[in-house]
Image (cartoon, coloured by chain):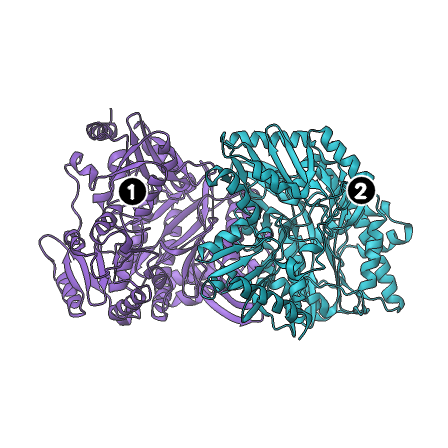
Chain colours: A purple, B cyan
Amino acid sequence: MNIYSERIGMLRAQMAENGWDAVIITGSDPHASEYVASRWRQVEWLSGFTGEAGDMVVTPDHAGLWTDSRFFIQAVRQLEGTGIELHKTRVPGAESIPSWLESRASVVAVDGLCQTTDAVMELERAGLKVADVPDLLSSIWPERPQVPGTPVITLSEETVGRSRYDKLTDLRKFLIMNDCDCIFITALDQIAWLLNIRGEDIDYNPYVISYLLVTQSDAIWFAGKEDGPSDPDTQDSFQELESDEVTVMRYDEVHEMIGEMSSEGQQKVFLDLSTICYSLYREVQDAVGEDNIVPGVSPVVLWKAVKNPVEIEGLREASLEDGAAMEKFLFWLDREVHSGRPVTEYEASEKLTAFRSAISGYRGDSFANISAYGPNAALPHYSTPAEGSSVIEPRGLYLVDSGGQYLFGTTDITRTVPMGECTYLEREDYTLVLRGMIALATAVFPEGTAGCQLDVLARNPLWQKHRNFGHGTGHGVGFYSGVHEGPQDIRQNFNPQPLLPGMVTSDEPGMYREGQHGVRHENILLCRRLDENMFGSWLGFETLTLCHIETSAIIRDLMTADEIEWLNTYNRTVFERLSPLLDEETSAWLGSRTRPV
Amino acid sequence: MNIYSERIGMLRAQMAENGWDAVIITGSDPHASEYVASRWRQVEWLSGFTGEAGDMVVTPDHAGLWTDSRFFIQAVRQLEGTGIELHKTRVPGAESIPSWLESRASVVAVDGLCQTTDAVMELERAGLKVADVPDLLSSIWPERPQVPGTPVITLSEETVGRSRYDKLTDLRKFLIMNDCDCIFITALDQIAWLLNIRGEDIDYNPYVISYLLVTQSDAIWFAGKEDGPSDPDTQDSFQELESDEVTVMRYDEVHEMIGEMSSEGQQKVFLDLSTICYSLYREVQDAVGEDNIVPGVSPVVLWKAVKNPVEIEGLREASLEDGAAMEKFLFWLDREVHSGRPVTEYEASEKLTAFRSAISGYRGDSFANISAYGPNAALPHYSTPAEGSSVIEPRGLYLVDSGGQYLFGTTDITRTVPMGECTYLEREDYTLVLRGMIALATAVFPEGTAGCQLDVLARNPLWQKHRNFGHGTGHGVGFYSGVHEGPQDIRQNFNPQPLLPGMVTSDEPGMYREGQHGVRHENILLCRRLDENMFGSWLGFETLTLCHIETSAIIRDLMTADEIEWLNTYNRTVFERLSPLLDEETSAWLGSRTRPV
């Protein structure tokens, strides 16, 4: 019996005691975060599964993990011996948790802090009775970490293009237009954007774990910790916010404040049910009554996604600096591997982070580097182990997916690097994926077009050869914020959100062959307005990412003349823009790697 | 004051008398048909607008026509002087009828026979009180035509691949699986398919205006007319159906029969609210009670769309025969126009129908030929006038969109024919549209893909040049049935219906420049399974249409090598398949037109 079976056993005892037929443990936190602080790595604690997306369901005779194709291989490996079964999501015929539970349980316990209201409503629609038990796992997890409290910094209007005062004014106008008295925001990325603050409470995500309540007269930020701000940065930041009429209160004071909301005097509360957790929703409901809750999508989602000119300039700067770090890394890698010294994936990853961290304004990586050689690259979300990672050989394909957080932007880039001789299949996959990336990057489309209507462009070269990849083609990217953001994306799912000028989205088709190799090419695209004519208003993309694409693995005959021209132009631009930032040796090397094909 | 203002005046008097704030007159009939018999050409009677899609709203101070971009130019012309305003649908910011009425009316009268239940529910959701007045216009339209009663024929199992007995058995199994006692079907295409019958009650649509009620023990077909079947074909057909245990009753007896449905004994009725008209829905509701209505999509929609092997063979045969008629027509056109004799669009249209009608099994055209020269082709749904149509000159582009109804299938084809010298813009549009058509025809996609996910392939070559077309790329095509059928389509709208093997869909991108020219290329595609591998199950298309594509207007440099190869292969196939059906002269001409480029 391993540690996970033991923990599941303790949970089952708790279930029996309370008369629950099932318990759902999600991979999220009270802020509907995609990435969470260690306190909320509940699925990992219970199952050993470390993927970023996964929910668990435990019944008296079954323990299951629901996750998507990005994590199938990892889940199989990590769940081995735990007795936990893998339930695949986002595949044809996949059964959702509510529908799986429908015939197997009547009372389901959830940690209402870590379930969105929408998700609980779905359970109820499936006929399940939901018992909300905040911090459900705490009683059997004595060493559970506390809510973190890392230093808080503020960003100036010069850096982000709009002051918190103006942003809050926009939000207050929105409330008036929607006949609401206040909005209660729990999503950490929205709070960081609105208040122009950043923290380090969650790895790779520069957020401050907090809540925000905005009325016409007040803005109350529940961000303080038990013992007050301990470091000077946070003290300064809190003071700056107070002088901007943002009241700072303690994180745990939010419950008391909700309790004081009154249903008298028409206190209408705007809530985004897709992000507010169920426990807080219930507290608001108890305080003001169901009829005074106005459900809707927070306007901050779209405001944040459409970058302003200052943010766009910042992202261009970030792409430039980040690209130079990438080229330094790729040059180092090329030389080291071909010198015959065994370089591991982990060493390479550390080296890349070192190059990035030398950039002024660097605040950390935007996610854990994926540094994957050979068959490891077949796992789209491979987690490079610190100990015992593979050696990068001078042949085949090495894949590196990484990004940086800078005061002036966020980056996300994937390069697949032919380390030497490649098989025909490796080269074919490399070429087809590249064609898909180019097709999306050069797309032109009328205003109103959504990402799902463009997705096929990136897949078509693969589909023509009866190949495909199991993840989305593109996700929104924040400005010194989460590397994944909505509301737009580029994937097969019917997301009706049109791509708007100012939105920044990744372009990352791939190809994965278990046990063999993986290919992914990823650039970041800025949506821009091109022109307007009798047929409509036309949009297109500017590629922000600057880092050369290796040409040695390309099968030229599979590409069109236009594609070759795009590639040569891109590589030339990369050389011209980056060489001033590189030393002579690196620059010369880059010159040789970007020669036209 | 013209005739239409007069009629609208009469309607307004009726409105005032009854206390209605608004009246909606739809372009449909009691069967939710897209094309209707003259009795239901109510919008035309009231407004003079002859387009196939249009709904009218009349209030005391406004008369408006709602239609989509296919008919904008036509509507502007036909509504001139009537005082009726055009409301554009399917454009950004378009306001639907319910939302337009929301602030302008409280009581809205509708002819509940010509409104689907879904549409009325939408009005009610907008807070409107709906007065259902069956045959609302009849009192002010004394010469209103009767319900037609054309000859009814039956199709054998050898022709359609499945007997009516087997089809009804499938439907009865469906009822059992859905805990229903009966299904009431009002859609004419579904009835024709289920019973293997055809008629001529609606121009171009081989239907019998009728209703069908199917229980476990009975199938009652409400198809007879007042004075019984007058022609021997219909008498034979009715007898054949009776011997197959289908009871034939009079069309107007349906109301009495619904009245006899009882809510006792758990009489559960399956109804497709998207096709059943509101008046009949209310009658069923009164008879069995709301709780005994099971709403859903009729399974016949999908069964009918997925063609069986016999139907597929029939459609291949129809494409062959139809293609030969098209080539005879194109040869005639080429010779006549270049002989210097003035050939009008109308004469050409008549000639084309004459070539088609010589085919054994021909039952009529599948829609009114669109025979459009020069600027007329800029109207995607141009209606060629019998008097005063344009002369086809030996230069520029002539567009012909047409199709046939055969006992063994339905066809729909568009060819744009360069009649001589063309401008660069004409040639460029011609080439880009062709590239789009080829891209869709050669698409390969995993099982589960919907048409809206492929649509961009047909638009991309145009979008790249900031051009677009305002209609869908593809619609389902029936088997000796409506030339438009669901549930699948290929367009921008999010229709989640996946394309399935056996479905037949058009591929018809276009380009229209008002006052200049129009281009459309249309082939019919059969969806087929290609193979299955580790990445999924792969589908693709077989092009059914056989008629050469003119190469003289092509700008070769705009096309890829693969596209040129597709075109040459297609034209060679057309020649090889069709020349055995053509006389020597026509065959030689076709040989010269299909020389590889």
Side of A264 where B429 appears, left or right: right
Q: Quadrant of the C terminus of chain B?
A: bottom right
Front one among A66 and A265: A265
User: Residue A377: x percent and y percent?
Assistant: 41, 42
Side of A481 where B304 appears, left or right: right
Residue at the spot 18% in from the left edge and 56% down from the top edge: A261
The chain containing the residue under callout 2 comes to B
* Residues at marks 1 and 2, CA–CA distance in whole angstroms: 72 Å
Could you tell me the amino acid type at mark 1?
Gly
User: Residue A267: x percent and y percent?
Assistant: 23, 60
What kind of element bears circle 2? loop
Q: Where residue B230 is drawn, which disc sits there?
A: 2
Tell me if mark 1 has few (under 14), some (14-19) or many (20+) residues whose alpha carbon lies within 10 angstroms of its own: many
What kind of element bears circle 1? loop
Front label number (1 vs 2): 2
Side of B597 where A305 appears, left or right: left
The chain containing the residue under callout 1 comes to A
Q: Is residue A218 visible?
A: yes
